[in-house]
Amino acid sequence: MDYKSIHGKVMNLDPKIRLVTICDLNGNIMHSGHREGVENLLSPEESKKSLELAVNAWKTRSTLQSKIGKGKYVLAEYEKIKRITMPLDDGHILYITTETDADHSKIIEYARREAG
């Protein structure tokens, strides 16, 4: 899988996307990068912790998959950012942060198409 290419396609979907990270279900980062000129709100350690929490939450939700179906995405909205977590394939997650005024529905729809 060409993680760099997928990262670039997703990053180019919308100028309000701040960060795109592709990782496996163990939290190992395959490719990641912030938009040029975007200020990091978290330290590297905090960013790693946030990613770990998102991956673990995704894995926990997946245990209910047989009853509620496969997860499509999770949206967390904070005062300063939105965070979208969604499957890239069965073994990888796409982790996207955006500005609060980003059209997350459009980003999710297009990211699913571009990543697929």
Image (cartoon, helix red, strand yellow):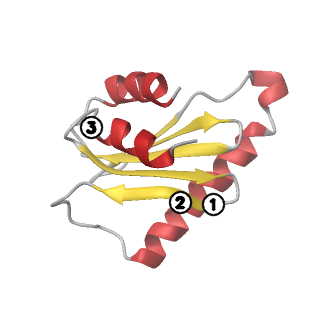
Residue 27, disc: 1
- Asked if the residue at tag 1 contacts the one at tag 2, i.e. Cβ–Cβ closer than 8 Å, the answer is yes
Mark 2 element type = helix
Outermost residue on the left side: it is 37
Q: Identify the amino acid type marked 1.
A: Gly
Residue 51, disc: 2
Give the residue at x 21% y 65%. 39
The numbered mark, 1 or 3, whose residue comes first in the sequence reads: 3
**What whole-number distance in Å separates the C-alpha atoms at marks 2 and 1?**
7 Å
> Is 56 located above or below residue 111 in the figure?
below
Q: Nearer the viewer, mark 3 or mark 2?
A: 3
Q: Identify the amino acid type marked 2.
A: Leu
> Is 17 located above or below residue 103 in the figure?
below
Where is residue 8, by image quadrant?
top left
In x, y percent, where is residue 27? 63, 60
In x, y percent, where is residue 90? 71, 36
Mark 1 element type = loop
The numbered mark, 3 or 2, whose residue comes first in the sequence reads: 3
Mark 3 element type = loop
Tell me if residue 74 can be seen: yes
Give the residue at x 37% y 76%. 43
Q: Nearer the viewer, residue 95 or 58?
A: 95
Q: Is residue 60 left or right of residue 83?
A: right
**What whole-number distance in Å separates the C-alpha atoms at marks 3 and 2?**
21 Å
Q: Which residue is mark 3?
A: 12
